[in-house]
Amino acid sequence: MPRFNRKGVTKILFTDVIAAASYLPTAAEMTGATDYTKQIAAVEGFALENQEIETPDMDSTFVSKIPGDDQASDSSLTFYEDDTADTLETDLAKGTVGFIIICRKGKTAAAKGMDVYPVRVASNSAEITADNEAAKLMVKFSITDRPLLNATVPTGP
């Protein structure tokens, strides 16, 4: 089984339009999405987590568990801030609704591993620091519905 480094392979896009109720984008919707990969300094969250339910019983001192509700982890993207343009602040302003598309194994048509998260921007804030590092902007997202996980990148026109 070949291994790979996500840097240089994984692509992260944003679009405000996916027509399918399944959240599977068309090739045209993928083409129209904004590719933010080159501007991203850090990724947090974008995972589905299960809130397990403890089920102790009187027959054992072992506390077993069963699967409970699913929820999305707290999710954010940290971007390098542009010193002249405010595209990120405008395109991903607080309250913006859309979809984060993560192509884990690349954006090539028919590639496996595409995740689509329906989101609303919860906050868009500059990270102010006196440290010797590039200026950054953190965008936090609320995941608003169950994401589409491990889909295939669409092919065709």
Image: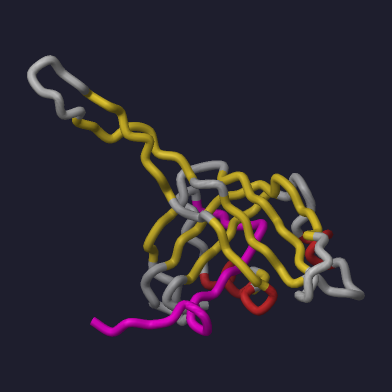
- Kindly give the residue lying farthest to the right in the view shown: 84
At a point 37% along the width and 40% down the height, the residue shown is 50
At a point 66% along the width and 47% down the height, the residue shown is 120
- Kindly give the residue lying farthest to the front in the view shown: 131
Quadrant of the rendering where the N terminus is positioned: bottom left
Q: Is residue 55 above or below residue 85?
A: above
Q: Is residue 143 above or below residue 154?
A: above
Task: Please state if 132 lies on the left or on the right of 39 as rendered.
Answer: right
Q: Is residue 150 visible?
A: yes
Count of numbered circles on the image: 0
Task: Please state if 14 lies on the left or on the right of 147 as rendered.
Answer: right
Observer-nearest of 50 and 100: 50
At a point 67% along the width and 57% down the height, the residue shown is 16
Whether residue 49 appears in magenta in the rendering, the answer is: no
Q: Quadrant of residue 135?
A: bottom right
Q: Quadrant of residue 127?
A: bottom right
Q: Is residue 156 visible?
A: no
Residue 61 x, y percent position in the rendering: 14, 24
Whether residue 15 appears in magenta in the rendering, the answer is: yes
Residue 84 x, y percent position in the rendering: 91, 75
Which colouring convention does the figure follow? Answer: secondary structure
Q: Quadrant of residue 130?
A: bottom right
Q: Is residue 20 above or below residue 136?
A: above
**In the image, which residues are magenta?**
1-20
Task: Please state if 99 lies on the left or on the right of 139 as rendered.
Answer: left
Residue 113 x, y percent position in the rendering: 39, 68
User: What is the magenta segment's predominant secondary structure?
Assistant: loop
- Kindly give the residue lying farthest to the top in the view shown: 58
Q: Is residue 55 above or below residue 29?
A: above
Observer-nearest of 50 and 19: 50
Residue 106 x, y percent position in the rendering: 47, 79
